[in-house]
Image (tube, helix red, strand yellow):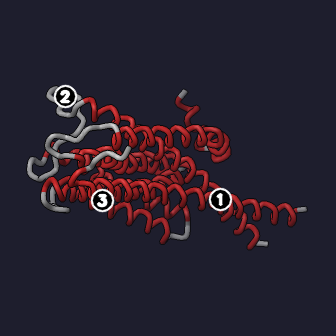
Amino acid sequence: MVSSYWEYANPTRFMQTSGWLLPVVAVLAVVTTAVGLIWGFFFTSDDFRQGSTVKILFLHVPSALMAINAWLMMLVVSLIWLIRRHHVSALAAKAAAPVGLAMTVIALFTGAIWGQPMWGTWWVWDPRLTSFLVLFLFYLGYLALWQAIEDPDTAADLTAVLCLVGSVFALLSRYAVFFWSQGLHQGPSLSLQAGERMDMAYKLPLYVAMTGFGLIFVALVLLGTRTEIRARRIKALVARERMG
Amino acid sequence: MMPDLGRYAFEVSAAYIFSLSVLAGLVIWYLARNARMRRDLAEAEERRSRRDG
């Protein structure tokens, strides 16, 4: 069973499987995201304290979640690259980074624009906000490193190491609210522990939006990995042409 | 149909417009890059098959 997973490390097998999987995931992503956001924006009432700004929740939480999870996915596939040298895993990490960066930008922007009316400031050097900003810089650095190195295997090695280092900040972004009590940012919005605060009227559309953002991530990583496999094949063909 | 966003209309609208624009831009960029690589690969494969006979 476990060995069968490694079949997908074969680029040909990956292209075959992702060829039929991608349209399915893409349609599900569009539908789920649209349902979650339309439900959240049009069909939820204002919060008694936050007013209509509560509707920003349906963008802010899913994007923040995916910003962190994208980096953690990159960590897993980077480790696979470092240990087993499967090229598809390195290319999947490269394909995931722009999505993670976009999710981080959305989380930072929606957080700032939500924070202004609620906290009276766009930005504060709160542990969670600061670790998120550092995560954003890590995404930029990660993408820049891929662009800066000509040899793809060396680029994959160095970006994998950068990914391991950046994982500290990805985890910090998620757990900063637990072990730092200072700061304006609230605790986790969703929790399995007793004493949860969020009403079902908000929680259900939020779960749908989170699923939608997750599916967008999966669809774009599949598409991006396919693109990177093609780009690598082009490089190999061009190199062969040059050698005559 | 449009909900009354009250005094936070700017903040909520800006958050949605910005986020949806970023997502749309991201999807368009991925699709465009994929289409370009597809085309370039087809051209490279054709050149190779012509050369190899």
Mark 1 element type: helix
C-alpha gap between disc 3 and disc 2: 29 Å
Q: Point out the frontmost of discs 3 and 2.
A: 3
Please determine whether, in this image, residue A37 is positioned above or below residue B43: above
How far separated are the C-alphas under marks 1 and 2? 47 Å
> Which residue is disc 1 drawn over?
B35
Q: Chain of mark 2?
A: A
Image quadrant where one finds the C terminus of chain A: bottom right
The residue that appears at 43% across and 38% down in the rendered structure is A35
Instruction: Check the image and report above or below for A215 versus A104.
Output: above
Total numbered circles:
3
**Residue A104: x %, y % from top left:** 34, 56
Disc 1 vs disc 3: which is toward the camera? 3
Specify few, some or many for label 1: CA neighbours under 10 Å numbering under 14, 14-19, or 20 or more.
few
Residue placed farthest to the left in the image?
Answer: A182
Q: Chain of mark 1?
A: B
Q: Give, as a three-letter code, the residue at label 2.
A: Gln
Visible in this render: residue B29?
A: yes
Chain letter for mark 3: A
Instruction: Give the residue number, with chain letter if any, for mark 3.
Output: A109
Question: Element at badge 3?
Answer: helix
Tell me if mark 2 has few (under 14), some (14-19) or many (20+) residues whose alpha carbon lies within 10 angstroms of its own. Answer: few
Q: Residue A162 appears at what percent x and percent y? A: 37, 59
Disc 1 residue type (three-letter): Ala
Q: State the residue lying farthest toward the front.
A: B1
Q: Secondary structure at mark 2?
A: loop
For disc 2, the marked residue is A193
